[in-house]
Amino acid sequence: DVTVDAVKLMIGDGVKKLVERGFEATGGIPSDEAVEALMGGFIEDYEANSTVLTRPFPGAKDALETLRKAGARMALCTNKPHGAALEILGEFGLDGYFEEVLGGDSLDGIKKPDPRFLLETLKRLGVDPAHAVMIGDNQNDVDAARGAGLRVIVLGHGYPRIPPAELGADALIEHFDQLAAALDGLS
């Protein structure tokens, strides 16, 4: 059996890595062909059940509303499959906050930490990277932001595999109610 805490440490690098890590935790990694074959079933099941155990972090919706009222333009760039991301956003009433949503399967073979993922998201949003800030919770987010020339705020909770204070962010927050002040501090 794999615990929920163990699975949390597997999250963040896309479906293929999650499937590989799951097999590794239960006895070994099958061949690339087997992983590819299993990913289709995983994605189908995940998209159908993506909101079952999912909840927004406390204060996330309020922070989005504060940013929207301040005139911020927002996009979501996630390694989660695009369909699942849209399902989750819709289920929790968060879909209206983002002008663009790109998932780990939106760009052929490109996802975080590849900075091109963020750059394409910003291009679609029509925002210069010099005027953007990445908000994330793990090393992939920081690496993608740095590679794209963005400043980055890291949440002290989420799914990091190393302590958030060691990720090298421009700002670290413990709760979404600190986000507006952190953004002000970067300007």
Image (cartoon, grey):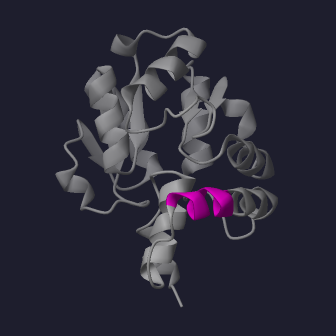
Task: State the image coordinates of residue 108 (x, y, percent, origin top left).
Answer: 58, 30
Is 152 placed left or right of 67 in the picture? Answer: left
Whether the magenta-drawn stretch holds residue 21 is answered as no
Task: State the image coordinates of residue 110 (x, y, percent, origin top left).
Answer: 49, 32
Query: Which part of the image, by quadrant, shows the N terminus?
Result: bottom right
Is 45 placed left or right of 119 in the picture? Answer: right
Residue 83, image quadrant: top right
Residue located 36% across and 44% down the image: 140
Task: State the image coordinates of residue 114 (x, y, percent, origin top left).
Answer: 38, 32
Is 157 placed left or right of 54 in the picture? Answer: left
Residue 97, image quadrant: top right
Whether the magenta-drawn stretch holds residue 36 is answered as yes
The stretch of residues the image draws in magenta is: 32-39
Residue 69, image quadrant: top right
Residue located 74% across and 42% down the image: 86
168 or 156: nearer the viewer = 168
Above or below for 45 versus 69: below
Instruction: Name the dominant secondary structure of the magenta segment.
Output: helix
